[in-house]
Image (spheres, rainbow, N blue to C red):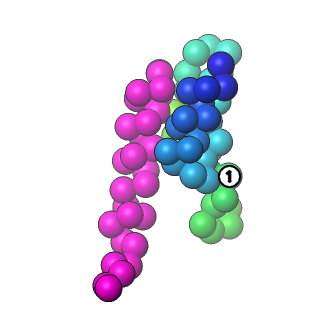
Amino acid sequence: MRPVPRQIENAFPGWRVWRSDEGWWYATRVMPRARGTSATVYGPGPEELTRALAEEETPWLERAPSVSA
């Protein structure tokens, strides 16, 4: 069962992915950017979890400083 969670973790570094006993998929940020509660996202399957992670990461990606050559 680890191959799919590992693929998601590789695509979204800094997140730990697991599947609950009820079948829902979860990811929790393992290296939070700030102190306090870590972000957790979830979905009924790996595809939905991947979309939720992409939405969670989008604000950080948009705010990342651009690097000029």
Q: In the displayed structure, does residue 11 sit left or right of residue 30?
A: left
Where is residue 34, by image quadrant?
A: bottom right
* Quarter of the image with the N terminus in it: top right
- Residue at 66% across / 59% down in the picture? 31
Magenta run includes residue 18: no
Q: Of the residues shown, which amino acid type is indicated by label 1?
A: Val
The image position of residue 27, as x and y in percent, is 58, 39
The image position of residue 6, as x and y in percent, is 61, 35
* Vertical comparison of 19 with 32: above or below: above
The image position of residue 58, as x and y in percent, is 36, 56
- Residue at 68% across / 52% down in the picture? 30
* Vertical comparison of 54 with 6: above or below: below
Q: Residue furthest front?
A: 69
Q: Nearer the viewer, residue 55 or 35?
A: 55
Q: Nearer the viewer, residue 38 or 45?
A: 45
User: Magenta-highlighted stretch: main secondary structure?
Assistant: helix
The image position of residue 66, as x and y in percent, is 34, 78
- Residue at 37% across / 72% down in the picture? 63
Q: In the displayed structure, does residue 58 sit left or right of residue 19?
A: left
- Residue at 38% across / 37% down in the picture? 51
The residue beneath circle 1 is: 30
Element marked by disc 1: loop
Q: In this picture, which residue range is highlighted in magenta?
A: 43-69
* Vertical comparison of 60 with 64: above or below: above
* Quarter of the image with the C terminus in it: bottom left
At label 1, counting other C-alpha atoms closer than 10 Å, the crowd grade (few under 14, some 14-19, many 20 or more) is some
